[in-house]
Image (cartoon, helix red, strand yellow):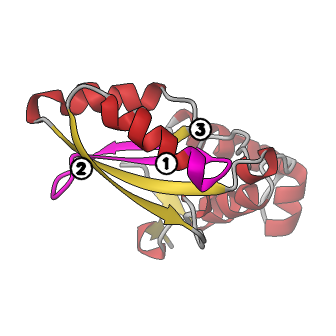
Amino acid sequence: MYKIDNIDTKIINLLMEDGRMHAAEIARRIGGISERAVRYRVDRMVENQVISISAVVNPKSLGYSVIADVWLEVESDAILTVARKMADFENISYVACSIGETDVSVQVLARDTAEVYRFVTEVIGKVPGVRKTTTSIVPLVLKDVHQWKIPSVFVEK
């Protein structure tokens, strides 16, 4: 497990604010650290897969204003096959296998609820191995994975 300290956490939080922030600006805002040390720490965290730096697309700005969570009950011998098939669809932003009442959960992005309905009934529901789907429209997202911050319990002082 990677050991993260307070400086790493501050760097990460600043990069979450603006992923294009220059090392010099990060060093200035943190204080007491050089630009070179910031670059070293960022490179080390990327290399150790603690962080990745990438663009995050805003689906709503492209007209995909409806988000739906869809849970799938799947034949037991087809769970991974169905999950991989779901990952191939461009309008699915999240796929996970789960343990519990459902076997696979996905998040569908659509332009309207009619598009969600068509996709769930005519595409997902017809994938071999899918027995049942349960869909919930998500009207409001308060926190998403790219907004998750490192819990203080993991930060070395």
Numbered range of the magenta stretch: 94-115
- What separation in Å lies between label 3 and label 2 (alpha carbons)? 28 Å
Compare marks 1 and 3 and give the one earlier in the sequence.
Answer: 3
Crowding at dot 1, Cα within 10 Å, few <14 / some 14-19 / many 20+, comes out as some
- What separation in Å lies between label 2 and label 1 (alpha carbons)? 23 Å
Question: From the viewer's perspective, is the residue at label 2 or at label 1 nearer?
Answer: 1
- What separation in Å lies between label 1 and label 3 (alpha carbons)? 39 Å
Compare marks 3 and 2 and give the one earlier in the sequence.
Answer: 3
At 62% from the left and 46% from the top, the residue drawn is 110
Q: Which residue is mark 3?
A: 46
At 20% from the left and 30% from the top, the residue drawn is 129
Circle 3 sits in a helix, a strand or a loop, which is it?
helix
Disc 2 + disc 1, Cβ < 8 Å: no
Circle 1 sits in a helix, a strand or a loop, which is it?
helix
| Mark seen at residue 14 | none
Quick check: 149 left or right of 35?
left
Q: Is residue 104 visible?
A: yes
